[in-house]
Amino acid sequence: MAEAPSSEPVYEVECPHCHKPFRAELLDGAAPRYQGFKCPHCKLFVPFERADEQELVEKLD
């Protein structure tokens, strides 16, 4: 059985630590500072606000 597509948008993110690109859904936290992405390469938490400021994140359609 196929998995239903996620309703969450997917983002293309470049990790500010290891500089490797990855695709991920936005992790939603209790506060805005806990919203972001977890790098699958180096395991760094990348806050959405910081990644957006540094132009390291792009929303995919």
Image (spheres, rainbow, N blue to C red):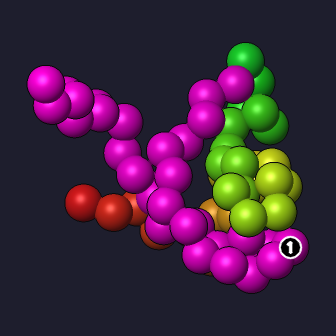
Q: Residue at left 71%, top 57%?
A: 39
SS assignment at label 1: loop
Q: Position of residue 44 (x, y in %)?
A: 84, 55
Q: Residue at left 54%, top 42%?
A: 26
Q: Position of residue 58 (x, y in %)?
A: 47, 68
Q: Nearer the viewer, residue 58 or 39?
A: 39
Q: Position of residue 34 (x, y in %)?
A: 77, 33
**Residue 57, above or below 25:** below
Residue 47 visible in the picture: yes
* Horizontal side of residue 23 vs 27, given as left or right: left
Q: Residue at left 33%, top 63%?
A: 60
Residue lying at the far top of the rendered structure: 30
| Label 1 Cα neighbours within 10 Å, binned few <14 / some 14-19 / many ≥20 | few
Q: Residue at left 61%, top 35%?
A: 27
Q: How many marks?
A: 1
**Residue 46, above or below 15:** above
Which residue bears the numbered disc 1?
17
Residue 54 visible in the picture: no
The quarter of the rendered structure image containing the C terminus is: bottom left
Residue lying at the far bottom of the rendered structure: 19
Task: Provide the residue span drawn in magenta.
Answer: 1-29
Q: Amino acid at mark 1?
A: His
Q: Position of residue 29 (x, y in %)?
A: 70, 25
